[in-house]
């Protein structure tokens, strides 16, 4: 709403307040409640604007706005009770129904958000897929879940569309592998309980790892022996990038095509997010060099320089 409309509304409310004070025959309690409701309504907008100016956090602005609205609702209900109790009990059920319908989605999202936070289905930093959206979880709150996709776009999904729906979690926990002590080393230990505590600490310490599965269809004309060699050459290049060597498996063979499953593994899912496109590109260039680089020799190596020379000759 534009500022001039707010000024017009404030002027009307001020005139109404003056009429209530000097011309109305209502009781003093009713007059006071009317004035309080008008004051709260007038102060509400400037107070929210001041809060937005002081802090940029949306949560603080939401808390201030909800607090003012709750206070206003309390004084409004008190006014209805004092003005006409019959009217109050007649209006309240309709108000409750209207509020529940309007805030149904908000309540559903908040309940779903609380269940997501308490159930630990996934955490911030996990690579997941939900609602046909793949990406890393950047934020989970009571209202929504924010996911950053592979192309860098951040998607905000209401929690009611996340909780209870199918969610694929590519990030999981794995136990840390430890090397047990030899018999001589164990005998050197003065207290075997300390060793048992160490084993228990290592077993309970969990390390997160991410295994992203990507389905890829290739032409069945590629020799399986060459396929293993060609893919391995790309895997070796990306092993130091991901930290773990990728792998693959043959899924199905049909209609002259072979579907393979690429297993991209890393302890840091952000690396998968950043390098997956280049990884798939290099696989494509390795598998089909003849098709991609076909007729490239027709183009001069320094096409820009050749173009500039041609333009110079024309001048």
Image: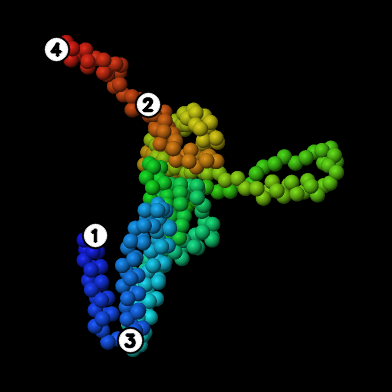
Q: Residue at x 82, y 38 (%)?
A: 185
Position of 109 relative to 80 (above/below) = above
Question: In the rendered structure, are the residues bearing label 1 and label 4 in contact, judged by CB atoms less than 8 Å apart?
Answer: no
Point out the residue furthest to the front here: 22
Observer-side mark, 3 or 1, equals: 3
Cβ atoms at labels 3 and 2 below 8 Å apart: no
Name above or below for residue 284 compared with residue 314. below
Residue drawn at point x = 22 percent, y = 15 percent = 308
The residue beneath circle 1 is 3
Callouts 2 and 4 close, C-beta under 8 Å: no
Residue 218 visible in rendering: yes
Instruction: Find disc 3 in the rendering and name its residue.
Output: 27
Mark toward the start of the polypeptide (4 vs 3): 3
Checking the image for residue 289, the label placed there is: 2
- Quadrant of res 180: top right
x, y percent for residue 106: 39, 65
Of marks 2 and 1, which one's residue comes earlier in the chain?
1
Q: Give the spatial CA distance, label 1 vs label 4.
A: 62 Å
Q: Quadrant of residue 188?
A: top right
Q: Which residue is mark 4?
A: 315
Q: Secondary structure at mark 1?
A: helix
Q: Secondary structure at mark 4?
A: loop
Position in image of residue 221 (x %, y %): 39, 32
> Which element carries disc 2, helix, strand or loop?
helix
**Mark 4 → mark 3, Cα distance in angstroms:** 96 Å
Looking at the image, is mark 3 or mark 2 earlier in the sequence?
3
Q: Of callouts 3 and 1, which one flags the residue occurring earlier in the amino acid sequence?
A: 1
Numbered disc in front, either 2 or 4: 4
294 relative to 212 in the view: left or right: left
Between label 3 and label 2, give the one nearer the viewer: 3
Estimate how packed mark 3 is, as few (under 14), some (14 to 19) or many (20 or more) residues with alpha carbons within 10 Å: few
Mark toward the viewer: 1 or 4: 1
């Amino acid at each position: 709403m534009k500022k001039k409309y707010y000024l017009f509304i404030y002027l009307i409310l001020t005139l109404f307040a003056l009429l209530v004070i000097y011309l109305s025959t209502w009781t003093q309690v009713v007059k006071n409640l009317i004035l309080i409701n008008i004051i709260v309504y007038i102060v509400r907008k400037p107070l929210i604007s001041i809060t937005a100016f002081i802090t940029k956090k949306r949560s603080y602005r939401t808390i201030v706005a909800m607090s003012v609205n709750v206070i206003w609702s309390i004084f409004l209900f008190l006014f209805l009770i004092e003005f006409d109790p019959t009217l109050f009990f007649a209006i309240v059920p309709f108000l409750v129904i209207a509020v529940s319908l309007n805030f149904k989605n908000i309540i559903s999202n908040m309940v779903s958000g609380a269940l997501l936070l308490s159930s630990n289905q996934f955490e911030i930093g996990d690579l997941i897929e939900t609602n046909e959206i793949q990406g890393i979880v950047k934020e989970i709150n009571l209202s929504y879940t924010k996911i950053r996709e592979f192309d860098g776009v951040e998607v905000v999904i209401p929690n009611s569309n996340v909780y209870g729906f199918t969610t694929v979690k590519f990030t999981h926990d794995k136990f840390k592998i430890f090397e047990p002590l030899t018999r001589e080393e164990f005998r050197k230990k003065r207290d075997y309980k300390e060793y048992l505590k160490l084993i228990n600490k290592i077993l309970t310490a969990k390390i997160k790892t991410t295994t992203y599965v990507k389905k890829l269809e290739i032409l069945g004309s590629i020799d399986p022996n060459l396929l293993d060699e060609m893919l391995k050459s790309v895997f070796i290049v990306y092993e130091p990038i991901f930290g773990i060597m990728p792998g693959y498996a043959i899924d199905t063979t049909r209609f002259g095509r072979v579907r393979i499953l690429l297993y991209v593994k890393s302890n840091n899912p952000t690396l998968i997010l950043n390098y997956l496109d280049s990884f798939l590109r290099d696989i494509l260039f390795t598998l089909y060099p003849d098709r991609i680089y076909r007729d490239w020799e027709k183009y001069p190596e320094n096409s820009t320089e050749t173009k500039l020379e041609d333009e110079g000759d024309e001048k």
